[in-house]
Amino acid sequence: MKKVFVLLLTALICLPSHAGLFKIINRTGTCIAACDSLEVEVNNNLPNADQSNYLKGMANASVASQKGLGASYGSNIEYLEVGFTGAIGADLSGNSTSQLLKGDVDYNQIRGIGVGGAVSLGLKGDLFGSSIGPLDMKKTSFYGYFLTLDAPNRDGLDGSATSLGMHLRYKFIEGGGAGLGLFNWGGIDITTGFERAAMKIKFVETISESVTASGATANFIGSATVGADVTTYTIPLELSTNFQFFYVASFFGGLGMDLSFGKAKSVANLTGDISVTGGGTGEGSLDLGSAESPSLFSLRAFAGLQLNLAALKTFILFNKGLTNDSLGLALGVRLAF
């Protein structure tokens, strides 16, 4: 999972830049055309981001990165379930899901990315008695998950991600089987709970650029620190169902609503001086914005496939935002008893 984390963060920071995070302000004298060209060259070393949507995209991607880490959708546990899951979330912006499936993605438009992971535990409710208040424990399952991932500090990249959550799943409508158990419908489940995602990413780029234009030369030697500090909290409400065929494959899907809070704060720091020949001056600035929250209320659809080999369950889960541009992917393995 660490390798996946590093690759995803590296992909984010290596996108070509067009948004212009680096600006030269307070220009005087010959710092005109030469400084325009210097801005372009320095921005080519920095992530592609826009102050107006970068942090919003990071916050929504953080929420999407938690989907699939806790509650199990592909089967109904009898006693307990333990597992490990890795997940990613992204704000695709102008990219469509069909473009993603075809591999025809404009990576310059991706606004944000989030990473999640979980060691999870699921318990059947009737282990705690026959009922708790209005809940029939035979129809209830409890799930909890937690994991912290750290990216190796190398090539100026440093990051970490922590996932924490609890879910309650209730069997709203009982399912049934046919064909001597070769086909089974799992009924309809209601799932709710609490999800917390925290991610810190920081990329330090050493920059040395010199540009000549209109008879003047502009130089910048220094370093730029770019990243985000994201913490989101989500209360999900989901309706889901699943179908099992020949004991081996389970298909599942549903609809979800998320009530989300939290902040994505920018990490932006610039060191170094700008020098311009011919009496020009200018000051470098780096702006990612200050802070943004995820979409307060969002709708999504999800679907997945689970392969069953006795107690061993492996699954893949896709989540697609219906009211925003978020997308989530989770891969996991679990032991169910």
Image: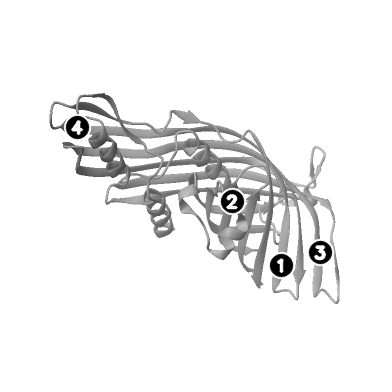
The percent coordinates of residue 159 (x first, y second) are 37, 45
* Label 3 sits on residue: 185
Identify residue type, mark 1: Ser
Q: In this rendering, would 325 be left or right of 129?
A: left
First reached walking from the N terminus: tag 3 or tag 4: 3
* Label 2 sits on residue: 327
Which one is in front, 93 or 216? 216
Which residue is found at the position 53% from the left and 49% from the top?
90
Which one is in front, 141 or 111? 111
Tell me whether the residue at label 4 lies in contact with that at label 1, contact meaning CB atoms closer than 8 angstroms.
no
Q: For mark 4, does the 10 Å Cα neighbourhood hold few (<14), some (14 to 19), or many (20 or more) residues?
A: many
Q: CA distance from mark 1 to mark 3?
A: 9 Å
Which residue is found at the position 26% from the left and 35% from the top?
33
The percent coordinates of residue 261 (x first, y second) are 58, 32
Q: CA distance from mark 2 to mark 4?
A: 41 Å
Tell me whether the residue at label 2 lies in contact with that at label 4, contact meaning CB atoms closer than 8 angstroms.
no
Identify residue type, mark 4: Ile
First reached walking from the N terminus: tag 2 or tag 1: 1
Which residue is found at the position 61% from the left and 51% from the top?
70
First reached walking from the N terminus: tag 2 or tag 4: 4
Q: Nearer the viewer, mark 2 or mark 4?
A: 4
